[in-house]
Amino acid sequence: MIILSAKNLTKSFGKKIALSNVNVEIPRGRIIGLLGPNGSGKSTFLKLATGLLVPTEGEITIDGAIPGVETKAKTSYLAERTYLNGWMRAEDIIAFFEDFYEDFNRIKAENMLKELNINPSDRLKTMSKGTKEKVQLILIMSRSAELYLLDEPIGGVDPAARDYILNTIITNYKENASVIISTHLIADIEQVLDDIVFISKGEITMTSTVDEIREKYNKSVDGLFREVFKC
Amino acid sequence: MKWYIDSDRPIYKQLVEQIELRIISGVYSPGDKLSSVRDLAMDAGVNPNTMQKALAELERMDLVFAQRTSGRYITEDKKVIDEVKKALAFREIEQFFEKMKLLGFGKEEILTLIKKVEEGENSNDNTKR
């Protein structure tokens, strides 16, 4: 059962090719790390999956459909930059998400805010960078989606909250859902990943399971990444 | 008991070893019900599929058995547990001998050293590595 499929997916911005001829199939029930150095095309790939960008060539499908209204209802996307207004309070955004998404679970979101000691009546603009990130991730993970696309979800978050967030990711997705996490903080997340996709200069250079890499190279994914992408 | 996952070996193997250790050392008693895959995965901070794989391996080793509707249990067969315990002891001893050989000790020397340390006669070598 494939939730996301890309065929000859290419995206260029003018002369610059961001993604070149990418072929990949993501099955359901997996947590996938989309790993690559800065500017390798990770965010572009996720934006193509959400429909925020359209392919230059080739196609990408979610559960068999081209990104559109239908696929957006089952895709939960954490953008690399926030699209929420600074004047909004956490509770406003919860109401906003509740209106927007049928699969949004308000109780889940409120519980997570409480567990991370975030005051629901605080405005976004008064929060620290890390707290803002937490709020957004809580919103994204409180949906009961079939595909989660998380673009750099833990970059600004402290290590303790990181553990909490990773646990949230492990426990909150349904069995038939998949989670794609783009990041370069590999060491922190590799324990929760099933599979990894290495992406470099717009091309996929390796797909594997985490344990296959450890078995084959006697190295962590983080170690292999540092070797493959050595500057 | 905390879970320790190091970075360079397959995660599921490390989970198998640590659950083994918990069974042998009595943290889990024979016949105990194991938590759900998801809860175990969350506790260890690993992917549920990886935990699932580890449990399948433990089932294959007969240390754990699944009851179709009610979950997974630790074996009640003490013989199986004893065998795993022995195998683990052998593994540890083999690794110890490997290391001592690297330090340049012969078999007899090692055995004498062990005796000495055990009797507390040697003040230099009984410090922890």
Image (tube, helix red, strand yellow):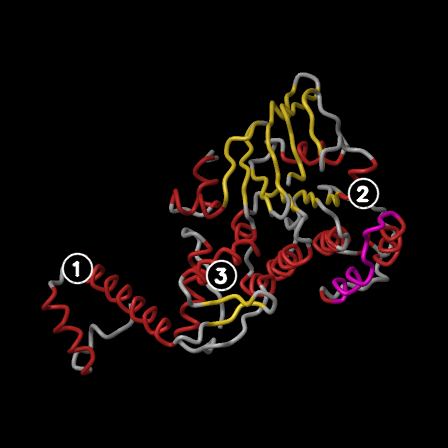
A86 on left or right of B128 = right
Mark linked to residue B55: 3
From the viewer's side, name the closer residue of B30 and B126: B30
Mark 3 Cα within 10 Å, few/some/many (few <14, many 20+)? many
> In the shown orientation, is residue A144 left or right of residue A205?
right
Q: Amino acid at mark 3?
A: Leu
Q: Over which residues does the magenta segment extend?
A: A100-114
Direction from residue A50 to residue A166 in the image, left or right: left
Chain identity of mark 1: B
Residue position marked by numbered label 2 in the rendering: A73
In magenta stretch: residue A111: yes
At numbered mark 1, what does the secondary structure look like: helix, strand or loop?
Answer: helix
**To which quarter of the image does residue A127 belong?**
bottom right
* Rendered-image quadrant of the N terminus of chain A: top right
Residue topped by disc 1: B101
User: Tag 2, which chain?
Assistant: A
Q: Nearer the viewer, mark 3 or mark 1?
A: 3
Which disc, if any, is residue A56?
none
